Amino acid sequence: MRIKHKVVVMLTAVLPWAMPTHAEVLAPQTLFEDVRVWDGTRDTLSEPMKVLIQGNLIREVSTTAVAAEGAIVIDGGGRTLMPGLIESHVHLNYQHMIGGYDTIELRDWQEIGAMAAGTARALLLDGFTTIRDPGASLTGIRSVIDRGEIIGPRLYQATAVIGQTGGHGDFRLKGQRRLEDRTTFRAGELGMTHIVDGRAATLSAARQNLANGASFLKMMMGGGIFSSKDPLHSRQSSDEEIRAVVEVAAAWDTYVTAHIYLPEHAQRAIRLGLKEILHVPFLDRETAKVFVKNGVYYNTQLSASKPESLEVIFGPEESVNKAKARVAQKGMANVVKILKDMPELMALTVFGVDIVTVSPEDARRNRDYEMYFWAENFGNLSALKSMTSIGGKVAALTGKWNPYPDGPLGVVQKGSYADLLIVDGNPLEDITVLGASADQYGAPGRAAGEIETMRLIMKDGVIYKNTLD
């Protein structure tokens, strides 16, 4: 019996936020017919293919007839089937923290959790089937997503960031400057950050994160923009403290990433055993070669290089944080040049936006622009691989501690997770079919899920959007 896909269309069109429909739950298999596959790695689309999903995994990718009795059959009409997108730097609890990190003191878990749930839903409906949150969200939201009680992407989390007193993870206000306030201020109480000094305290913080379900660990190893106590040039956490966190991660078969701005700090992190580095807007070619030599992944954010982005993120008033952001912007153009000249580093670079403290509308506009920026500067193929197969490789660094251990992510192949998109057109030629836009802040914002060319979204074998005829 062939269950027509129109049943799914009708149900999902009425309830796009709903739980999996009755038809989807009952059917053990979904067969996509007449789709051109981009597998997450190659520079061309396939010839027309059939892709069979059984449960939450891809069971067959074939040019010939596929036996799938009782399957839901979906005719792709020659459209592109590709991996779901991976956003490798999302802060669910910070993204819409309008007014900055200082406002954490004014919020409770219900408000923060509701904002995070809304962000998770919006990301999935924009085609991001997996996200990495390197700090400040706890695993409760992952649990309710995985149980199907709310919708959202797969979620890899570092839980609380780990950093020193006065470092980038120290969000205390001016009236909270006593040592004892390191554990009694709101972000500390809510498990968003650990302010710790010395090997013993740092070791305990890392172990606590893993006990809380963290997939990987994140350290603050240098100055940052959204923290007013530390200059950008500051070197944070001792070698002994960093080794303690690396040791804890290795014992769980996972890895450590870090917030870093200066190239010498990145080289130190790589020497001490980190597997991924975030930011480094002042990257130089010597350090880029160290990344490549050691196979360390690079997670940079580049769309904030436009001066007008500072007005949206910080508002019109001058501030210490805005001044630091202006300094960081100067280095970003050099990062683009290095990545263009070093395809071997681009092969280790993942797509991450790291947009925080803005409205949901501005977050979407910035993400759409970041996608466009990457394609314009590095080519569509490199941008797409950073958002799929390379992001999947970073997710797999969690090893035996991987919360999703049954198959690879970011690729379309037998045995991989059934996280898939069907889009009009060819994203290798036109990145806008995925929602990419040249207008970072000028055009009116769109609502979540309003990418008309993104016709179908499947995560874990479940269809969450289907507007095919």
Image: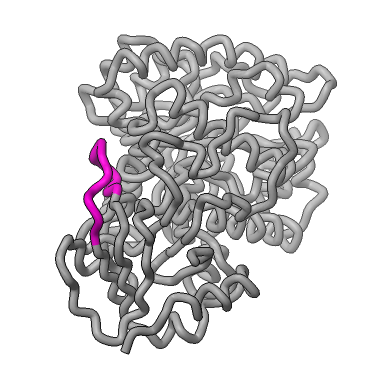
Q: Residue at x 62, y 34 (%)?
A: 366
Location of residue 338 in the rendering, given as x and y in whole percent from the top left corner:
37, 13
Residue toward you, 5 or 102: 5
Q: Quadrant of residue 3?
A: bottom left
Location of residue 435 in the rendering, given as x and y in whole percent from the top left corner:
55, 42
| Residue 157 visible, this angle | no
| Residue 171 visible, this angle | yes
Q: Is residue 93 magenta?
A: no
Location of residue 354 in the rendering, given as x and y in whole percent from the top left corner:
56, 36
Location of residue 386 in the rendering, given as x and y in whole percent from the top left corner:
37, 37
Residue toward you, 140 or 27: 27
Q: Residue at x 54, y 37 (%)?
A: 436
Q: Quadrant of the N terminus?
A: bottom left
Residue toward you, 195 or 380: 380
Determine whether 72 is above or below 449 in the image. Answer: below
Image color mode: one colour
Q: On the picture, is 314 further left or further right than 330?
A: right
Q: On the picture, is 369 further left or further right than 3?
A: right
Q: Quadrant of residue 56?
A: bottom left
Q: Main SS type for the magenta part?
A: loop
Residue found at the far left of this picture: 64
Residue toward you, 453 or 440: 453
Q: Residue at x 27, y 19 (%)?
A: 290
**Which range is magenta?**
38-49
